[in-house]
Image: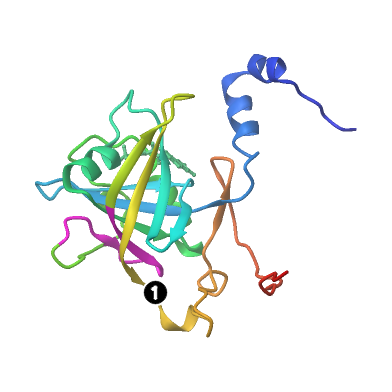
Amino acid sequence: MKVKLIESELARLGKVPRLNLVNSLSGYKSANLIATANSKGQTNLAIFSSVIHLGSDPALLGFILRPTTVSRHTYDNIRDTSDYTINHIHEDMIESAHQTSGKYPAGHSEFEATGLTPEPWQDHRAPFVAESKIQIGLRFEEEHLLEANRTRLIVGRILEIRFPSEIQDPDGTLDLSRAKVVTISGADTYSLPATIRRMPYVRL
Ligand SMILES: Cc1cc2nc3c(=O)[nH]c(=O)nc-3n(C[C@H](O)[C@H](O)[C@H](O)COP(=O)(O)O)c2cc1C
């Protein structure tokens, strides 16, 4: 049997079933921790499944931030210092990474709450997550408020990348499966993808 739902039926679903259903529709998503600090040096860490590639020259990454109707420490800190790091989540970090989604009060760092370790990034305020194998340091470039639902696309320029040399293929690609990087579906399901095939560039 095939389930068919139109927009009005979707709207009538309860909040949680709608959220769970719609959140699965974009397909597998990236799993990252965004680390920041405010200008007083107070660190913050939160999980994000919306990090996307925007372009490689200049090297840019984007992520979607939920509406700022409640306090969003990641956003406040990025606007305060312009620094942030994106840190891939691998298999052994799932529990502590997921824990960072809790609403911790300002002044209570998720690093202390979860046992994850801040790794200094030279003279930048934002730390990397020491446990992550793939670490990306960025500078805030621009933000776009999406009128449709008051979320924001936050755009950052990549300033530095750190990763173990063994996971890089000769052509430059990082083999995420070798680093055991996980993927997220919905808001709570973590999977470990396996590389099954690489395809050549299509030239016509
Ligand atoms: C699996 C998962 C993925 C999430 N992805 C996002 C996301 O892409 N954007 C977002 O704004 N919040 C996302 N969240 C929610 C944040 O992690 C949560 O709001 C967190 O408390 C934000 O922390 P902050 O206020 O310290 O920035 C996600 C939560 C989970 C559990």
* The N terminus sits in image quarter: top right
User: Furthest-left residue in view?
Assistant: 40
Q: Residue at x 60, y 61 (%)?
A: 192
Residue at (54, 43) in percent of width and height: 188
**Left or right: 52 as drawn, with respect to 39:** right
What SS does tag 1 mark?
loop
Horizontally, residue 22 falls left or right of residue 86, namely right
In this rendering, the answer to whether 192 lies above or below 41 is below
What is the magenta range?
A: 124-139
Crowding at label 1, few (<14), some or many (≥20) Cα neighbours within 10 Å? some
Q: Position of residue 50 (x, y in %)?
A: 48, 45
What residue sits 51% from the left and 63% below the top?
91
| Amino acid type of the residue that numbered disc 1 sits on in the rendered structure | Phe
Q: Report which quarter residue 107 is drawn in.
A: top left
Find residue 135 and report its horizontal and vertical position in percent.
36, 65
Residue 96 in view (yes/no)? no
Task: Identify the residue position indicated by label 1 in the image.
Answer: 163
Q: How is the image coloured?
A: rainbow
Decide: is 176 above or below 87.
Answer: below
Q: Residue furthest front?
A: 204
Q: Quadrant of residue 108?
A: top left
Residue 29 location (% of width, % of height):
56, 50
Q: Residue furthest right?
A: 1
Q: Residue at x 48, y 55 (%)?
A: 53
Quadrant assignment for ligand 1 = top left
Q: Is the residue 169 above or below the residue 129 in the image?
A: below
Along the viewing direction, whichever of 84 and 139 lies nearer the viewer: 139
Residue 103 visible? The answer is yes
